[in-house]
Structures are given as C-alpha cells and as structure tokens.
Image (cartoon, rainbow, N blue to C red):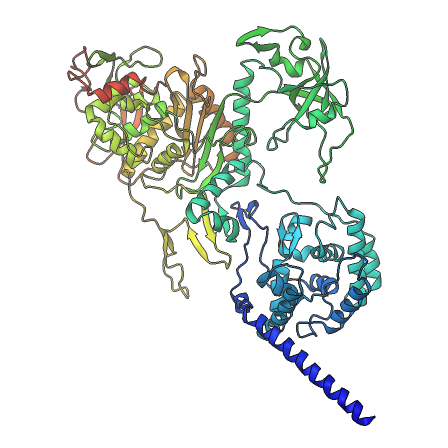
Amino acid sequence: MIRLIGYFFGIGTALALLVAGAVAIYIGSLSKDLPDYEVLAKYEPPVTTRIHASDGSLMAEYAHERRLYLPIQAVPDRVKAAFLSAEDKNFYNHPGIDATGLARAVITNFQNMGSGRRQVGASTITQQVAKNFLLTSDQTYERKIKEMILSFRIEQAYSKDRILELYLNEIFFGLGSYGIAGAALTYFDKSVNELTTSEAAYLAALPKGPSNYHPFRHTERALERRNWVIDQMVENNYISREEADKAKAEGLGVKPRRGGTYLFAGEYFTEEVRREISARYGQTALYEGGLSVRTTLNPELQRVARKAMQTGLIKYDTLRGYRGPVTTIDVSGDWGVPLGEVKSLDDVPEWTLAVVLESGASGLRIGLKPARQVSGELVRERVEGTVSKEDMSFAMRHVVDGRTLKANSPADVLKPGDVIFVEKREGSDSAYALRQLPEVSGGMIAMDPHTGRVLAMVGGFSYSQSEFNRATQAMRQPGSSFKPIVYAAALDNGYTPASVIMDGPITIQSGNTTWTPKNYDGRAAGPSTLRSGIERSRNLMTVRLANDMGMKLVAEYAERFGVYDKLAPYLPMSLGSGETTVMRMVSAYAIMANGGRSIKPSLIDRIQDRYGKTVFRHDDRGCEGCNASEWQNQPEPELVDNAEQVLDPMTAYQITSMMVGVVQRGTATSVAELGRHIAGKTGTTNDEKDAWFIGYTPNLVVGVYLGYDKPRSLGRGTTGGGLAAPVFKDFMRVALDGTPNVDFKVPEGMNLVSIDRKTGMQATPGQPGTIVEAFKPGTGPADSYWVIGMGEDGSNGYGEALSPQANQAIQSGGGGLY
C-alpha cells in the first residue's frame, strides 16, 4: 500500500514539475515580447494647453485629452484615499498583485460561470498602469498574465507614489477628461485641492465605467457607486462615519465646465492666439504639449472695447431701419421647441431670441427662447414678455426688398411666428427692446505703444455671428489715416510743420487717363502749412507733398512703419488707397507714440512648456543692474530698449503735435471732449466705404475701423470723424478714467516758436492767428514766403507722364478723402 502511494506521489510530482515547467516556459515566452516598462520613467502624456489673460484669468484650454499633469505630492490625502478605497485598498502592501483579491475574483468568476455575468478582473492599480501604458485592453488570459508579469517588474523599478501618480494622471474619467486634475475641472470646475469628500468619492467611482455612472443619464447609479466608495473609505479608516453620512447626504453637485473660450468678450483675441501658437509650434504642441500661455489681454479693457464697438455698430445700423426677423416658426403648438433650435449669439448674452406671439398697434407679445439645462434638456416653461412700440421705434422704418418704408404700427413690421432678438429693459422683469444684428462690422485694437502689447482686440460685432477677425484679417484701405506716414516722411527729410504747400486743383495724366484728386469738401484753401494740411485732411496738399519728395520715399517709410510689405510708389497710394489691416496701422501709430522707436506687436507675453520652462518671452529688453547682490548707492536699474529707431524722436514729436491739432481743431474735434492729451487722425475712403480713426495718448494707442465686409458705401456724409471717432471716444472715456492726464514729452533740444498759422512765418508779439510750433535744431520758420507746388503744369500737375502701373492705380479709385 505504501509502495502504491509512493508510486502515485511520484507520478503526481512529475506531472506537477512538468506543468510547472510548461508554465515557466509559457511565461518565459510571454516575457520575451513584453514592452519595455522603463518608458514609464520618461512618460509625457498629452496635456492640456492653457491660455491666460494678463491678470491670470483663464481664457481657453486646448486638448485632445483634457488633462493637467499633477505630481503626487500635490494630490490631497482624501483624494488618494478615495481612489485607494475604490480601486486597490492594499496598494501600499502588495508586490503588484493582490493575492487575496485575485483569489476572491477567481472564486466569483467560477461561481458565475454560465450565468452570463461579466467576469471580475481584480486588477490592482499597478496592473491598471501596466495595461493602460504598455498593453492593450483585450479580454484574454494571455494579456492578463503579461499584465501580472509587468506589474511585478514595475513595482521593483518604481516607488508606490510614482505608480499612483502615473495612474491618477492617465485614467479616463468621461466627458473628455483625463487625469484627476482635468476631471476635477471638468466635473466640478475646481482644483483638486478644493474637492470635497463627496466629490472625490464620485471621481473615484468613475474609472470603472464613466458612461455607466454619467451624472445626468444615470444619476441614481452614480449616487449608489459614489456612496459605496464613501463606505469603503470608512471601512479603511480614512474618514469617520459622521463624515461619511454627511458626504452621502449631498447630491452629486456636478457642474460641467464648458469647452472653448472662458473669458467673456475675448473670443477674437483667443482665436488669434490659438492660430499663433499653432503656427509657431504646431498642432501637436497646441493640443498635447501642455503649454502655459500668458497673453497681453487686459480683460477689463477688452470688455470696454467690445461695448464701445457694439454700441457704435448698433447706432449706425438702427438709423438705417429694420431689415426683418431672423426667421419664422410655427407658433400654433409648443413654440418653445422650434425656437430652441434657432441659433442664438452665445457671446452676446444681453440679447435673447424670442418669437412674436401677438402684434398690435401698441407693441408685441413675445415668447422667449427656453434656457438649456446642464444636461442639454430644454426647459419647458414658457416665459413671455412684451416689446412696446417705443422700444422698437427704429423698426418703424423697415426695409422691404431694398426699399425703406414707414410703418404706423408694430403689426405692419412683425407678425406672429417671426423670430427676433430682444434685450431686457433695465429694471423690468418682462419688458424688452427690439434688437437687430448689424450688417456693418469693424475691427478695433488697443496697444501699449512702448512694448507693442495688444491690450484689447475686437474683430467684429459677434464671434458667434462671424469668426472673421476684422482687426487682423480684413484688408482695407486706410484712407486719410495713412497721411501721417506721408507727413512723417516729409518731416524726417527737411520739411517742417510750417512748410507751406499749395492746396489747389491739380490733374494727373497718364496716357489717355487723367486723375483729378479733390478735397472732401470739393474746395481748395490755397497755400497752407503742413499742420493745416493734416488737421483739415487736405488731399490736394498730400498729393503735392508726396510728389515733391518722391513716392519712393513715401513707400520706404510705409514699409519701415510696417503698414505694407511692399507699397507701389504711385501717387494715389499717398492717400491711403493701398490695403492694410487695423493691426498694422495701430502698430505704425505706436511707433510715433513711442518716440520713433520700433515696436513688435504681440498678443503673447510668455510661453512656458509643461515643466515651467520659459520657451518664449516677448519683452526682450535688457536690464543692467537688476541682479545686483546688494545696494551700494548705485543708480537704479533701467530697462534698456535696443529697438530700432525708425523715426527721428523729434520728428515723432512733430507729427504727434500736428495730430493733436487734428483732435483740437481738425476732423476729430469730438474726441477733444474727453479733455485729454490725445493725438489722432481720421480716415475715410472713396465712396465712404471705410471709416477709420486711430489715436493715442503717451501710453495707449487705439485704432478703429468700420465698414461692410463686402465693401459698399456707408452713406454720403459718413466719415471717420463721425463714425469711427465716437467709438474711440467711448472706449477712451472708460479706459483712461482714473489715470493722470499725461502730456506728450518734448524731446530735449526741440525749439518751440510762435508762427503765423497761414504763412508759416515767425509771428510778431501779440499777433493774432498764431500757434506755437516745434522745430528741430538748425531749422525754423522761413524768412521769406515760399510755397511748395506753385508753378506745376496745370494740365497734368507735374509735367510728366505716369507709368501704366500708376495709371492702373489711378483708375482703381485713389485713396483717402477725409
């Protein structure tokens, strides 16, 4: 009997050894093809790029996977406790495999055989790291064995904290978020440090199946799973029962963070930054590189700029009548459903879509577009309001088939079913005013002239309406706002503000084509000083001046100022007939405001990579003495500006002084109402297609352009001074509030001389009609009266024929008027 037992024992031992050998060989074969776990040491997951305003406000996030990498030291203990309780309570004690949990899973799976239930995996956090980083998600025993082998190796190579860090930053939480930091922002709009026990427990419940515990579609299931996690935290002695009961009594409290841009009114600016980052570093860096971008945007100035531009566009548009409803829907049934499908303006929250329910002689009864809940379901309550006849008075002039008709009653303009925009009357719960999306649009930029930092940018009335940025992308004729470049070139090359030029009729002939430029008012003032020419925006004087010094010189300065890359040296270009952008024009004026020193316009102050290393900084000025170790009575450190001197500083002051005259006595006198030291120039192109105003104080440059996207006349009599300057004024009134009224600094050595406004010659004491003018050393008022432009051949203006290219430029319509 004993021999028989020994016999069977030997056979069993041999078989066990054979099986063990086979298993060893099998595991060995699997081990040969295992991925290199050492790549975890160089792990760089796709991380969200974040864009911030100058005050740190979050503007936008860009990511394929919304993830922010968080070191384990920055994860609060309660958050760690929630995940350990939910996923692997023995994490800090097992070698990579939890034998107890594995045995429990094997028994459970054996009991569930044939029941159709899903098998239990019993994966530890280490195993999940191995699977997520190095393996596939195939439900096979081979993959599971590889996972176990890698788990042992990972545990030997890395600390427990490092493994937990990898896990918490990699896992998917649903709603497009990856990693604990991204999930906290996505679900609760909080940082990880701000999460409550209840919130941490819910996030810890999600990795098992984010879609199964969706906060809105499967709320009850999500609460049940969260509460289970909370109970596990009590069982593992992480929290007390009292804390658990309090946490379980709370709702999920999920407040999903919206995607796209976050800063109100900053959509155009944000998109411009996104394009720049993409062009500079590529799409992969933008959406996966985890860049931290600090922009130049001033949120308060941005809101003011948006308001000023929208007010100006609405004012112009409403004077031209009402063009009709957005669309028409059926209001016989539940009008909230079809109205909810009409696209509104997400970035104009002051306006609401509404449908006309009744229209009569006294006004309208309207139904407001239903609000949307977080879950995306429409609110079904019907909210109604009224629009009085007085609150839609502009619509009494309504446009039908291109004709403007006068209506006597709101019922003549709108009927039931018409969808309209309305804005709530201040101080009322149900009274609204009719609004209309303007056809006209424009662009606006505010810039620091000393650094080129763009502080605010408006690219149109609404980004939701049109993503086309009129401040940077629209190529338009600057008209007379280009004239300061012409005059600056003259002042930099021997002319003075007191130089006298003939303001008289002139004709330019090229072959069979003639060009006869005119002043806006159609009249000529005769001999006038350069100052008078720019203050009154005289075209004839500008053409004669450009011809006298040569268009090649004008083109050189236009390119030096960055207005154009290449300007054709033809006389019509001196009136601003070449196309450019608001950004370029504002940058050119910033040079004049900056004492003639070049600036590099920038929307970005600094870019840091995922590790915090600065990879780009806009301000590259040096600072000698800034890093002194101690105070030894040395001079205070100063920033050294090595930017190129584009214009003589004295010339910059002279042209600035002349443009101060534009505001005080010229074509932009409405701006003088601000009571500030402001220089600027209006611009209006042929047929009043474009209206401009660009102005500046010593510390702020602002440019405004208004016009139709498809160029057409803004209406006879519409000028930059009447349309664009008020937008500038509205912005500056708020932007400069509370700031000192700083005057422009007179360069050392500049001579200030009293001259006769008309002749440009030195004035005698007490002489009327004088003005103090600035002259460079060695220059001054003329000793004798001399007029530039006298004696030209009246038939063509200059006694010479123009090239075919110049002739073509003339036929294109010339440039600025006013």
Front residue of this view, candidates 231 and 106: 106
Q: Is residue 244 left or right of residue 602?
A: right
User: Split into 4 quadrants, where in the image is the N terminus?
Assistant: bottom right
- Along the line of sight, the residue nearer the viewer: 153 or 459: 153
What residue sits 77% from the left and 46% below the top?
218
Along the horizontal axis of the image, is 481 left or right of 355? left
Q: In the image, what residue occupies the spot 63% across and 13% down?
A: 393
Relative height, residue 191 to residue 124 (above, below)? above
Q: Is residue 599 left or right of residue 237?
A: left
Residue 239 shows in the view: no
Question: Residue 488: which quarter of the image?
Answer: top left
Where in the figure is residue 628, as x and y percent of width and height?
Answer: 40, 63
In the picture, the quarter occupied by the C terminus is: top left
Residue 627 appears anywhere in the view: yes
In the rendered image, which quarter is residue 228 located in?
bottom right
The picture places residue 503, in percent across and down from the top left corner, at 26, 15
How many labels sit on residues? 0
Residue at 53% over, 69% down: 38
Position of residue 130 relative to residue 249, above or below, is below
Q: Position of residue 707 (x, y in %)?
A: 45, 22
